[in-house]
Structures are given as structure tokens and as C-alpha cells.
Amino acid sequence: MPKIQVNNLSKIYGSSPEKAIEMMENGYSNDAIRKQTKNVVGIKNVSFSIEEGENFVIMGLSGSGKSTLLRCMNGLNKPTKGTIIIDGQDISSVSKQELREIRRTKMSMVFQRFALLPHRNVRDNVAYGLEVQGMTWELRKEKAMQSLELVGLEAWSEYYPENLSGGMQQRVGIARALATDPDILLMDEPFSALDPLIRQEMQDELIELQKKLRKTILFITHDLDEALKIGDRIAIMKDGEISQMGSPEDILMSPATDYVARFVESVDRSKALTASSVMIKPRSVIYPKDGPMVALRIMERYGMSGLFVTDRDGAYIGYILAEDASKMAKQGERLLDPGIRKEAPVVAPDTPLAEILEVMAYTRIPIAVVDEQQKLKGVLVRGSVIAGLAGERREHDGFTA
Amino acid sequence: MDLLPRIPINRWTDIGIEYLQIKWGGGFDSLSEFLKGFIISLQDLLIFIPPALMILILALLAWRFINKKAALFGIIGLYLIYNVGLWGATMQTLAMVISSVVLCIILGIPLGILAAKSDTAHQIITPILDFMQTLPAFVYLLPAVTFFGLGVVPAAIATLIFAMPPVIRLTDLGIKQVPEELVELGHSFGSTFHQMLFKIELPLARPTIMAGINQCIMLSLSMVVISAMIGAKGLGGEVWRAIQRMEIGNGFEAGLAIVVIAILLDRITQSFGKNED
Ligand SMILES: Nc1ncnc2c1ncn2[C@@H]1O[C@H](COP(=O)(O)OP(=O)(O)OP(=O)(O)O)[C@@H](O)[C@H]1O
Ligand SMILES: [Mg+2]
């Protein structure tokens, strides 16, 4: 069962939502609805589900309905139509008390402009949610400090928000959200108000934290780079609708609409794409028990200047160059082993393209992509990497070094 | 012009007041007794404290909350009041001002909260406040006397009517000015109405509310001479007597004492509005 299941959710702002919904269902545009009924369509028939522990990112331009959608999750906005099922419970039909309890324990929110209380010091800001729960002073102080440690700000607990930089303030915001130990984090453009460098730092920190905590995160951004970095899955919104949903690779490699494609054009692919998205299948491999003659024959057949060597289970061993193989053949060697270059470069499937380009600059051997079990998953050759940077996907390529 | 007969607002008002008096007279009497008891006790307490000690306390307050200069001003000003023999009158005035201001706060802040939280309440309260503030004070001195007799109680009530509007208005405004995001923060963590009010809205509205209380104190002080006309004593009484006897010098002294008290109270309450460090 998914953690969060959203079905046909719509939100109309205004005084006559029934009329607007009816027009919406009859296919009128948002503009037409606004002109005729004075109502604004916030989101329009949105459905998706989020698994436990997933980082789900919603992105889109200003006014596309991202905040509206997020705020429906904790009832800050009341949906006009549709359901939101969290852990099997429909959020849009619970009582006030139940909703309050859900907000206290199940989910917390991180705000774009931090939303720290200026009259409270950092510790008491972090303890806010615990205080609202009615926890004793000693206990909530202790928990707040633990939460501050997670974001590395325990030394700042007595300071007031105004004494902290933006990045630190948002760390306090995150500590506050984590203090109540919720399952779900709702983050509405949490890093948009920060300088680019700080923003990247915070993204990295969030990713690290998430490795430890495994929360279900709903993260909003209007920055595709950020979406690609943080999201396990990304939903792209336009005019209140989801225009594409998928993994970062899906979105980059096959944008479903012009709207998405325009976003994608602006992205720095070298940071967003990983080895696994641009690698190709090795045409052929060779096993160590095969001799140099076999290796030479395969290379000749495919017109390649070298071959990857794996064992029978596909575990990566090294690379053999044509010139080495022919030298060994002349010397009458029967086994490949002495000629295998074991120091050849390898990368993990999730290595970003930016790092691959650096490795590639120093070697003329194709780069092996090897997973945690040492299995050879694919190879990176210049052609496929450049194609990836240019936005094309190639399944097979000329395998020349 | 005389299409309509004269509309007898004056008669209606008289009848209304008379009705209230007959119907609620007992209530007004006990309220009056209670208020009188409160103001007189406070007055007795203030007079009981030796002037030297009182000056010291006020100077220390000024030093703690404002600065040395204000403390020095307090010592000189208050000593001057003592020196010219207006100490007792000043304490009487202080007691009445404090009583009215406390009443204004007790009534005004909840009304302000109500106005901030409910649009209906806001729409009802606002015109009443406009009315209270623009109606000349002399006009409601009379009904105050009708209900509460002569003396310090009707004076306190008249002061209340005149000085409470800023407390209500600025409480209302202060709460409405709380940034939307902070209100949402409160909701997103599941705050109750109470928690929202006491942990977020009132603390954030404090500077604005304090500005309202400051205005309330100043307006109360501006009422002391008018109050004297219905029998309240104190500095206002001194001024009023001086006016009647054409004693310009005595009048000036009493006026000066009011100014000293006003400046001190103004500075001290203003400093409460700022964030403590
Ligand atoms: N309280 C409201 N009343 C009326 N219309 C609203 C309200 N809140 C949002 N809207 C409208 O709903 C639409 C979606 O707004 P929303 O705030 O969800 O967009 P967003 O994607 O979060 O944009 P941004 O990136 O600027 O935060 C917009 O057209 C907006 O004007
Ligand atoms: Mg938004």
C-alpha cells in the first residue's frame, strides 16, 4: 500500500466551486473558468501515489499549483474534490480533532521563508511541535537538542533566529519538522530563498539525512536541477495538472511535452545524469580462461581495440587491449591473465556525468560501470556520454575506444 | 425643509438613559462601589509609600527599561512635584490613570482579539469605536454622572470610554499583522486556538498592543482635567481650581506635573513594546 494516495484531486479557489468544477470537467480552460465564474483553478484532477521512504518532487513554474497541492496534504487547503489517502485514512474527511492529531504526529512542514518565531530562541523554535503536543519541558528540551544535533546546530540552541544565516535558519526549520518524528515531510520550496552555493549544500545535507531517516518526503521546487538531484520520482505540473511523472532519467531522456522539454533544456545535464543513464551494453566480454587468440578474434570481428574481462557470473575483472593480446599471442601465452589491465577505471552506476567526464579525460580505455556486487553493468564510451549530454538516448553504439 | 417632524433624538436618549437607570441602577451601584474601592485602595497605597522610596522605584524602573538619562529625568521631575506640594494630587491622578488603563486592558485586549478573529465582531466594533473616539468627552460626562454619581468613578468610566479604543484597535491590528506563514506554521503543527493565540499571535502582536496601551495611557492623562469637572481630585483638580481662581502660576505647576508623569509613563511603556534583549 502506498504511503500517500491522491485520487482525482481538484482545488478551486473562489465562491462557486461547483460551477467551476463542472466547467472544468466539460473541458473549459482555466482562463475561461476564471473569466466566467471568477474562480481560480488551483489544481485540476491530480492523481499520484507516493511510497513509504520515497522522495517525491513536484516541480513547475510559479502558479502551477504546487503549493496548493502540498497544502492539501495537511489540510491547510481543503480540496474541492477528490481524496487523499494517507496510511489508509482519507485526510479530506477527518474531523478537526483528528486532523490536528495527524498534523501533530504524522507530518510536518518546512517553509520557503523558514517561518521561525522571532520571539523564541532556536531550541524553543525546534520544540514548538512538541510543546503543542503537551510534552513536558525537560523532555521536549531533550528532543529538541537531539533534533538540532541532526542538523549540526546544537551549539546555537540559545541564539535567536535573527542571529542566524538563511541556511542555518532553514536547518532550524528542518530540525523543527523532524523533532516530532513524523513519517512525512512536506517541504514547500525549502531552499529557494537561499544562495546557490548554500542551496547545494542544503540539498546534499537533506540527501544525507534522508539516508539515515527514510522519511516520506514531498518536496516542491521550481528548479529542475534540484528536482533531479533530490527526487526519486518527479511530477511536473503545469496549470494545475501533472504533465509528466517519472524518474529523473525518464524526464530528462524523454520529456513528454514541450513544456517539460523546455525545462529540460535548461538543466545542466552533466550534474543530473548518471552513469547508468548513458552507459551502453558491452557488445561482448571475454573470460579469463580464454586465450589471447580468442580475444583477438572477437576484437577483430567487432572492430574493437580492446575487451572487458569478466568471470562466468558477470563480475568485472579488467580490460584487455588488442596490442597486449597480440603480443601475448606471439609469445605463445595460453592464458589472458598476465595481460589483463586491472587498474582500468571503473565507476558506480549512480556516478554523475560531471565526474565521469573527468575520468574520461585521462584514459583512452572505455570506462566500466560496476555495481556494488562488482557486476559489470555497462560501459561508457565517449560517444554515448556525449549523446547523453546532448539529450539523446542510445541503446547500442559503436563500441570503439 | 420641514417635511419631516423634528426627530427627537434628545428625548429618546433621555428615555433610554432613564430606562437603563431604573432597570440596571442596582448593578451600576455595585459596579460603582467596586470601582471606587479599587481606585481608593490603590490611591491609599501610592500615598502610603514614602515619596523618597517611590521616586527611587520609578527612577530604577526608568533606568532598567530605558536608560540613565530617563532615570535622572525621573528623579528631578518627581522631586520637583514633591517640592511644590503636589505629591498627593499626583498619586491620586496616578491611581485613577492606572485604574482606567488596567480596565482598558482587561476589556480592550479580549475585544481586540475578538475583532481580529471574527469579521462580524470587527464590523460591529469598528463603528462603535469611531463613535466613542469622535463624540466629545463632555457629552458622555453627563450620563456617566447619572449612572455613577460624582467623583472618581464616573471620571474613570469616562476615561475608559475615551482611552480604550486604541487598545482594541491595535490589538486587532497586531494580530492581523502576524505573517501568514507563521499562522500556517501554527496550524501545520496542529495548534489549538489557544496555543495559536498565546504562543504565536499575541507574542508577535506585542509591540503593536503595547503601542495601543501607550496611547491609552496618554489619552487617560489628557482626561484628567475634564475628569476634575465631575469631581475627580488629583492634578486635574488642581488645574481646574487654578482655572476657576485665575491662579496662572498654580495652574502651570499642576500642568507641569502632568507633563512629567506623562513623559515618564510614555517612555516606560514604549520600552515595553520593544523586544527585550
Ligand atoms: N488563497 C488563494 N486564493 C485564490 N487563488 C489562489 C490562492 N492561492 C493560490 N491561488 C491561485 O492558485 C494557483 C496556484 O497557486 P499555487 O500557490 O499553488 O502555485 P505555486 O505553483 O505554488 O506557485 P509559486 O511557485 O509561485 O509558489 C495560482 O493561479 C494562484 O493565483
Ligand atoms: Mg508555492
Image: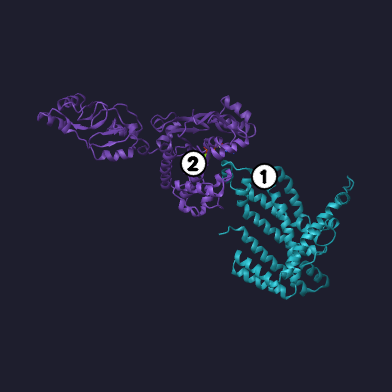
Chain colours: A purple, B cyan
Asked if residue A157 lies left or right of residue B228, the reply is left
Label 1 secondary element: helix
> In the image, which disc is placed on residue B117?
1
The answer as to whether callout 1 falls within 8 Å of ligand 1 is: no
Tell me if I can see residue B224 in this picture. yes
Q: Nearer the viewer, residue B8 or A347?
A: A347
Asked if residue B67 lies left or right of residue A234, the reply is right
Position of A364 relative to A124 (above/below): above
Q: In which quarter of the image is ligand 1?
A: top right
Toward which corner of the image does residue A347 lie, by quadrant? Answer: top left
Toward which corner of the image does residue B260 lie, by quadrant? Answer: bottom right
Q: What residue type is labelled 2?
A: Glu
In the image, residue B189 lies at what x, y percent? 56, 42
The answer as to whether callout 2 falls within 8 Å of ligand 2 is: yes
Q: What residue is at 65 percent from the left and 50 percent from the top?
A: B173
Chain letter of disc 1?
A: B
Tell me if I can see residue A76 in this picture. no
Q: What residue is at 78 percent from the left and 55 percent from the top?
A: B135
Q: Judge the density around disc 1: few (<14), some (14-19), many (≥20) Cα neighbours within 10 Å.
A: some
In the image, residue B126 lies at what x, y percent? 72, 48
Q: Judge the density around disc 2: few (<14), some (14-19), many (≥20) Cα neighbours within 10 Å.
A: many
> In the image, which disc is placed on residue A189?
2
Q: How far apart are marks 2 and 1 (CA)?
A: 29 Å
Chain letter of disc 2?
A: A
In the image, residue A142 lies at what x, y percent? 50, 48
